[in-house]
Amino acid sequence: MIKLSSIEKSYKTGSQQLKVLKGLHCHVREGEMVAIMGSSGSGKSTLLNILGLLDGFDEGEYVLAGESMADLSERVAAKYRSRFLGFVFQSFNLIGFKTAMENVALPLYYQGVSRKERNVRAMEFLEKVGLTDWAEHLPNQLSGGQKQRVAIARALVGKPRVILADEPTGALDSKTSREVMTLLRDLNGEGITMVVVTHEHDIAELCDRIINLHDGQILTDTVNV
């Protein structure tokens, strides 16, 4: 599903070039759930931004679902994001003045889906995450775990093939973190490929593989038994 070959990425800081990813190779198979770990500055966020087509790369090859992601215009990148990718963030990124249902339906608005169909599908995915009774509530009326469930439903509503989760349990207590990871694991069991960036070892242990980044390269790639 995801194939990275010799990926290099640098950023300009003043007159200096800071190389963040240094010839990175990585392959995530369809239906796999992979954790990415690493200390601050290891390249985790840069890698996730490249996988999510939010940032480009300087050298190498990125193939997503058999298609090259090199040199995409923003319009084409947005098309691929809409077609293939769903995003879950640590800070939830919900819109405060929209209800849970409206937040979930938002990606469908950008896909040109009618209001009636958006609402039907939003409710379908709120049911999937166990929140149908909270559909009309605003984010400030929800707990952290409920907000993250809404965010997961929003990521799923466009029926992506890959979910990219950036510290999805970082703002949650340990019990709620487990519940959210169980939900993600169940969804992964339905065939959705997952890439989870986390600094928590117990969360990473719930994935199929753990990739450890260090200084822009893969230090270890371990299969969880």
Image (cartoon, rainbow, N blue to C red):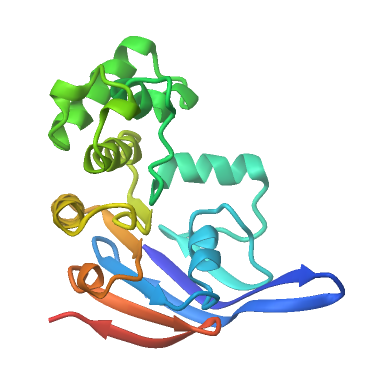
Give the percent coordinates (x, y) of residue 187. 18, 49
Whether residue 68 is visible to the viewer of this picture, yes or no, is no
Residue at (48, 62) in percent of width and height: 48
- Residue 120, placed above or below residue 161: above
Residue lying at 37% horizontally and 12% vertically, measured from the top left: 115
Q: Nearer the viewer, residue 98 or 87?
A: 98
Residue at (55, 85) in percent of width and height: 215
Q: Quadrant of the C terminus?
A: bottom left
Q: Quadrant of residue 125?
A: top left
Choose top left, top right, bottom left or bottom right for residue 128: top left
Q: Could you tell me if residue 75 is visible in this image? A: yes
Does residue 33 appear left or right of residue 162 in this picture?
Answer: left
Side of 101 relative to 46 (left or right): left
* Residue 37, placed above or below residue 222: above
- In the displayed structure, 221 sits above or below 144; it is below
* Left or right of residue 75, residue 82 in this image: left
Q: Give the percent coordinates (x, y) of residue 186.
A: 13, 52
**In the image, what residue occupies the spot 51% across and 64% down?**
45
